[in-house]
């Protein structure tokens, strides 16, 4: 009878050992994912990546992002949308998953539950239908921002569709998109995910021998206005966000293109 406490102690030590080993393995696995997320992938055109105000850039296979820990979302998501990427394949919609490549810890999808806001994709799943893997990668929590449903399914969806139209027409465009992250925003969930008051999308076309840009800035509410009413200069988005969108371009060309809010070379 006296041996029972000893067996209990041994059992507890074994359980603690197993838990500690599993924790070690999980930590090692996450460290590997974080390290992999720092590597620019072959199909990421890093020449057109913006600057990061947070210093925390993550590269996934089919898009890159700059994560803002204070706002628990990406300040920008950037990706190339080629004509060959466009597909009508309807993949099964997966569950959202926490992005383990975010070293500071990406927000949990439960922050959005019963919040009244959609888990709004920044890189749309519809832009990544060319494979199941590319589609599912857009369901990482680092790629979403709280959006009102009418906005997400309304004017923002119209802009995403128009972007796909330009990708097909111009044989590819480069897209940078996100919410305008600033102080004193409303937040949701235990992790206080910020709710942007405005969203932007900056599009660059470089496939026809001429580089051109187009920027949109939208208040976070649905609208029936035509999309060209939301066109602004890239400079205006840069002033609001502190992001330098195309720093690798020749300075003279960059200054000229980013100062313009003309949309005459784009078909609406």
Image (cartoon, rainbow, N blue to C red):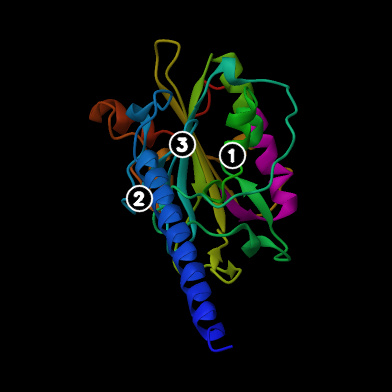
Q: Which residues are magenta?
A: 144-162
Looking at the image, is mark 1 or mark 3 earlier in the sequence? 3
Secondary element at tag 3 = loop
Residues under labels 1 and 3: Cα distance? 10 Å
Residue 56 is labelled as 2
> In the picture, residue 87 is in which quadrant?
top right
90 on left or right of 183: right
Q: Residue at x 75, y 51 (%)?
A: 150
235 on left or right of 7: left
Of residue 183 and residue 194, the one placed in the foreground of this image is 194
Q: Give percent across and percent down for residue 177.
A: 50, 41
Q: Residue at x 69, y 42 (%)?
A: 94
Chief secondary structure of the magenta span?
Answer: helix
Secondary element at tag 2 = loop
Badges 2 and 3: C-beta atoms under 8 Å apart? no
Quarter placement of the C terminus:
top right
Q: Is residue 213 visible?
A: yes
Residue 164: say if magenta. no
Q: Residue furthest front?
A: 1
Quarter placement of the N terminus:
bottom right
Q: Give percent across and percent down for residue 39.
A: 34, 35
Q: Is residue 184 visible?
A: no
195 to 38, vertically: above or below = below
Residues under labels 2 and 3: Cα distance? 13 Å
Assess disc 2: are there few (<14), some (14-19) or many (≥20) residues with their C-alpha within 10 Å of its C-alpha. some
Secondary element at tag 1 = loop
Q: Give percent across and percent down for residue 224.
A: 74, 43
Nearest-to-viewer mark from 2 and 3? 3
Residue hosting label 3: 60
């Amino acid at each position: 009878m006296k041996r029972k406490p000893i067996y209990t102690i041994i059992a507890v030590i074994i359980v603690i050992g197993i838990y500690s080993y599993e924790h070690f393995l999980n930590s090692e696995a996450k460290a590997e994912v974080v390290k992999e997320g720092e590597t620019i992938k072959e199909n990421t055109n890093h020449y057109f990546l913006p600057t990061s105000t947070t210093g925390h850039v993550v590269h996934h296979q089919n898009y890159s992002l700059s994560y803002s820990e204070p706002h628990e979302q990406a300040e920008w998501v950037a990706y190339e949308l080629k004509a060959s990427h466009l597909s009508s394949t309807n993949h099964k919609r997966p569950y959202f998953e926490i992005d383990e490549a975010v070293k500071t810890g990406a927000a949990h999808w439960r922050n959005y539950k019963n919040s009244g806001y959609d888990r709004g994709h920044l890189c749309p799943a519809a832009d990544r239908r060319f494979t199941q893997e590319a589609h599912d990668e857009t369901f990482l929590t680092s790629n979403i921002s709280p959006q009102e449903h009418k906005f997400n399914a309304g004017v923002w969806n119209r802009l995403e569709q128009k972007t796909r139209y330009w990708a097909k027409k111009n044989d590819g465009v480069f897209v940078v998109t996100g919410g305008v992250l600033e102080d004193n925003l409303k937040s949701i969930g235990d992790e206080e995910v910020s709710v942007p008051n405005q969203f932007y999308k900056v599009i660059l076309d470089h496939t026809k021998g001429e580089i051109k840009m187009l920027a949109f800035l939208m208040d976070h509410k649905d609208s029936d206005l035509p999309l060209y009413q939301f066109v602004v200069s890239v400079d205006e988005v840069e002033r609001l966000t502190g992001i330098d969108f195309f720093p690798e371009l020749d300075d003279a060309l960059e200054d000229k293109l980013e100062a313009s809010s003309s949309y005459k070379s784009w078909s609406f």
